[in-house]
Amino acid sequence: MLAVVKKSHTKEKIFEIRGAIPPDVVRFLETKYGQDLSVIEDDETYVDITQTPWYKKTRSRMTPGRTLKVYRERDHLTQEELGKRLGGLSIQKVSDLEHGRRGISKDLAKKLAVVFGTSTDKFL
């Protein structure tokens, strides 16, 4: 459950409480804050994202090179910066890896996994 109190005119959040909020606390907050209180019940229905059509479609289009580019952009690295972190690869070689013109070897996948803090299988 989530209880959020916001200022009336600006809707700026004053505070929020998350977790199992006892009913008497909710009643107190309703009495004290009225319309400024929002109580949101958690949806206990969770979906395994890897089983959704969206994920399957997206995953089917991902290549090791595209994955590399996603991770590089996520970490705000240029191709030059990534190349340096990988031991001096040229910008062209990083570009070739991202565009699938060069394959990613197991050794390079290990280096990428270290740089990005993930597993090697993301890049193979």
Image (spheres, rainbow, N blue to C red):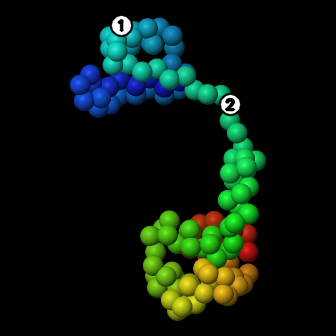
Circle 1 SS class = helix
**Residue on which disc 1 sits:** 31
Name the residue at 68% across, 51% down. 54
Question: In x, y percent, where is residue 29?
Answer: 38, 13
Q: Amino acid at mark 2?
A: Thr
* Comparing labels 2 and 1, the label whose residue is closer to the camera: 2
Quadrant in the picture for residue 67: bottom right
Q: Nearer the viewer, residue 35 or 115?
A: 35
The residue positioned 69% from the left and 66% from the top of the image is 61
Residue 29, placed above or below residue 5: above
Q: Nearer the viewer, residue 46 or 29?
A: 46
Relative horizontal placement of residue 77, taking residue 44 as reference (left or right)? left
What residue is drawn where x is 68% and y is 78%? Answer: 109
Provide residue 12's location: percent of width, then percent of height.
Answer: 29, 32
The numbered dot on residue 45 is 2
In the image, taking residue 76 as reference, residue 104 lies left or right, namely right
Contact flag, marks 2 and 1 (Cβ < 8 Å): no
Confirm whether residue 108 shows in the render: no
Total labels drawn: 2
Mark before the other along the chain sequence, 2 or 1:
1
Three-letter amino acid code at disc 1?
Thr
- Residue 5 visible here: yes
